[in-house]
Amino acid sequence: MTRTRLASAAGSALLVFFGFAPHNATGFSVGQEVDACSLLSVADASKALEQSSQPGKRMVESSPSGCIWSADPKMSDSSRRVAVNTHTPRAFTFAKTPAIKTITVEPVAGLGDEAFYQIYPKDSPFIWVKKGNNAISIRLMGTKANRFSLEQEKAKELTLAKAAIAKL
């Protein structure tokens, strides 16, 4: 190993050892996972759900990558819910070309570095947004009885995405 490479490796090891990991433009340490529950407020979720939401709750307690908001404290499948998930840029790229041909991808201009809707034939759409080294997806969910129309869901997801990426 050359002296330059050795010095670089030693310097990097010291930075990691002392907790001075490099940061990206979002202020998060490179490699640090964004807490999905920090990306929306209760007010954001309540407005989209058109009912008073509970605070966001992690989908898996040990993982900050997914969060759900709902008026139902149990977050049951029968309630309206907002789900936010964080993703890698690679997952974002894969999502743009779904393997299932009945899923439509519709670009969204002017949001983050790149954004699109994934539209399913008989289910709620997702909005995906990439900003820098971060990517998120947002989805409004409910039952047939309490779902919004496709256009309403897309509009609400767009509003939520704007609020979420402002915090990235």
Image (cartoon, rainbow, N blue to C red):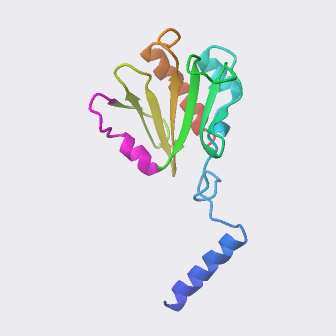
> Looking at this view, is 91 or 168 the one in front?
91
Q: Residue furthest top?
A: 145
Q: Position of residue 120 (x, y in %)?
A: 36, 25
Question: How many circles with numbers are drawn on the protein?
Answer: 0
Residue 109 drawn in magenta: no
In the image, farthest residue toward the left: 101
Tell whether position 96 is magenta. Answer: yes
Please tell me whether residue 103 is drawn above or below residue 165 in the rendered image.
above
Question: Residue 23 at what x, y percent from top left?
Answer: 62, 60
> Residue placed at 52% from the left, 84% from the top?
5
Give the image quarter of residue 109: top left
Residue found at x 50% / y 13% = 147
- Seen in the picture, residue 100 relative to 28 is either above or below; the reply is above
Of 109 and 7, which appears nearest the observer?
Answer: 7
Residue at the image point whose x is 61% and y is 35% from the top: 67
Q: Position of residue 74 (x, y in %)?
A: 67, 23
Quarter that holds the C terminus: top right
Residue 56 coordinates in the image, percent (x, y):
67, 31
Which residues lie in the magenta part?
89-104
Residue 76 vs residue 34, the one in the foreground: 76
**Which is more toward the observer, 147 or 19?**
147
